[in-house]
Image: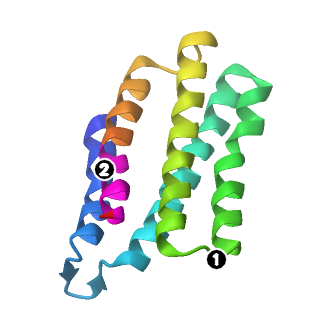
């Protein structure tokens, strides 16, 4: 079920990349930034649940880091490509924490971990392609 809900979340990234406009939505570079901000912040929020399940203090501290990270990036008003580059770094940092919580702490499930690998593999190219 998590794959059915999670994988379609990649669609807006590619609608933006290909600059596809739907009836009342313009999927452009700015929408890409907005959507990426929401998704990266959400990935940190998942760790509230990890904390509630495990009482792991690292999880609760990490849970707010992606939101603060994207807030700082947006507040510093970088150029588009710099923002995208910093977002890519953010996604991979979150993935590193996923590895930590899966392999070392053993407090996230295999399904969620596999989904995160798939989603990062889908998100990264959408961001990297904006450089070319």
Cβ atoms under marks 2 and 1 closer than 8 Å = no
Is residue 120 shown in magenta? no
Q: Is residue 128 left or right of residue 15?
A: right
Residue at image position (29%, 84%) is 26
Residue at image position (71%, 47%) is 65
Q: x, y (%) of residue 85?
A: 50, 57
On residue 125, the disc is: 2
- 69 or 102, nearer to the observer: 69
The furthest residue to the bottom: 24
Q: Is residue 54 left or right of residue 46?
A: right
Q: Which residue is mark 1?
A: 77
Instruction: Kindly state the secondary structure of the residue where label 1 is placed.
Output: loop
Q: x, y (%) of residue 118?
A: 31, 35
Residue at image position (64%, 50%) is 66
Residue at image position (48%, 62%) is 84
Q: Quadrant of the N terminus?
A: top left
Stretch of the chain drawn in magenta: 122-131
Q: Quadrant of the C terminus?
A: bottom left
Is residue 126 shown in magenta? yes
- 52 or 59, nearer to the observer: 59
């Amino acid at each position: 079920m998590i794959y059915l809900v999670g994988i379609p979340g990649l669609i807006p990234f590619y609608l933006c990349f290909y600059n596809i406009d739907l009836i009342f939505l313009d999927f452009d570079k700015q929408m890409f930034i907005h959507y990426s901000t929401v998704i990266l912040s959400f990935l940190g929020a998942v760790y509230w649940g990890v904390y509630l399940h495990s009482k792991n203090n690292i999880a609760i501290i990490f849970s707010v880091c992606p939101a603060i990270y994207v807030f700082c990036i947006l507040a510093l008003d970088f150029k588009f490509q710099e923002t995208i580059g910093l977002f890519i770094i953010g996604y991979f940092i979150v993935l590193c924490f996923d590895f930590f919580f899966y392999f070392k702490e053993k407090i996230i499930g295999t399904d969620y971990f596999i989904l995160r690998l798939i989603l990062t593999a889908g998100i990264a190219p959408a961001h990297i392609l904006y450089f070319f």
